[in-house]
Amino acid sequence: MSLRWQLRWAVGKVRIHKTVCTLLATALGDEVRARGLVRLPQWLAHLPARARGAHYQRTVQNLELFDLPPKDIEACACRHIAIEWQKGIHQQRYPLRHPALLRTWIRSVAWVDPENHWQRLPHSPYLLVLLHTGEYWMAVARLVERYVAPTRFVIPIWNYRDPFTYGALMSLEGLGHKVEILDSNSPATALCIARRIRQGHQVIIFSDIPVSLNTSRAGEPVDGTLFGRAAQFVKGPMFLASRLGCPVLLAGHRVQLGSHGQLHAIAHIAHGEVQDMLAHWSKAMERFIRQAPEHWFYLSQMEAFYQRQPDSAQRRSNIPAALTKHTHRRVAP
């Protein structure tokens, strides 16, 4: 199959998935839909492996890094596929244009904070840092909803041009707040975030982002480890927090099939040196994902974290000298 047809097939699968999710979101009653989603992992387990989903095989391969028994790997992979289906269905059902209904939906997401990390946050600036787990848009919404007073939120996202994500985040202004969405791929975003923090705005930012995914590059690399292997992440939240003197609350959503799920306050990361904050974040992130890996968006794409990517200086050094001279040649006015 040619590359052209592969791209067409990939786009076609996305459209088919969205169409099916729309039908399931509108054609079924709430109780029937909820019962079906609860049973979906069991139904998937009875299908041939190739019929369980486009990313099922890669999900199974990556779950082997978690040292799970074979039966648990299969069950976990089926739950991961079911979670992706529920996310697609809920995406069609969020009452984004009805603030009262949206607030009710958001409040139905259980708040899980047994160690009272939220109460430990100071009145001075801090960062709210999220993982791409569960319905991660709903994680943003649940954090925003906890603020009683009108607040200015700054939310950098990697899929800035996605209509649903952008529109869903802007709908949070219906809760009485102001929302500024930034493109995390833009070179000016880090400076803008620092400026907004100094102005007293609240930043909500995702942290578990690979440097490069498919054909897009998300930012500068920082070395780390992921489940015992050398890995790279986008250089971002912990560097900002350390430089600006901010502690961090790390949080993540977990799906409950047939329901609206939970938002977990995972860890409070005190302000400190960059390496100390990175180590704390990495340990807390791995622990949370390892407990229930089926909720992690990148479960089927983990190889993106293990691919070494050059930073900006290295990329510039690889440019031939002739091109560099040409780039810096003065142009007459």
Image (cartoon, rainbow, N blue to C red):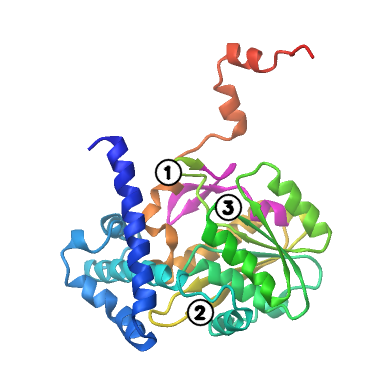
Left or right of residue 220: residue 41 = left
Quadrant of res 290 = bottom left
Q: Give the magenta part as a residue range.
A: 217-241
Read off the residue under disc 3.
160
Q: Give the camera-side residue of 60 and 189.
A: 189
Q: Are marks 3 and 2 in contact (CB under 8 Å)?
A: no
Give yes or no for residue 84 being in the magenta stretch: no
Q: Earlier in the sequence, mark 3 or mark 2?
A: 3
Neighbour tally class for label 1: few under 14, some 14-19, many 20 plus, Cα within 10 Å: few
Q: Earlier in the sequence, mark 1 or mark 2?
A: 1
Residue at point 40%, 52% (across, down): 302
Which of discs 3 and 2 lies nearer the camera? The answer is 3
What kind of residue is marked 3? Tyr
**Circle on res. 214:** 1
Which structural element holds mark 1? loop
Query: With respect to residue 156, does 137 lie above or below?
Result: below
**Circle on res. 225:** none
Query: With respect to residue 22, does 63 lie above or below?
Result: above
Q: Are marks 1 and 3 in contact (CB under 8 Å)?
A: no
Image position, residue 267 (x, y; %)? 60, 71
Residue at point 51%, 74% (across, down): 94
What's the distance in space between the residues labelled 1 and 2, CA to CA? 30 Å
Left or right of residue 97: residue 119 = right
What kind of residue is marked 2? Gln
Q: Quadrant of the C terminus?
A: top right
Query: With respect to residue 190, does 87 lie above or below?
Result: below
**Circle on res. 262:** 2
Which structural element holds mark 3? loop
Which structural element holds mark 2? strand
Q: Give the camera-side residue of 321 and 92.
A: 92
Q: Earlier in the sequence, mark 1 or mark 3?
A: 3
Which of discs 1 and 2 lies nearer the camera? The answer is 1
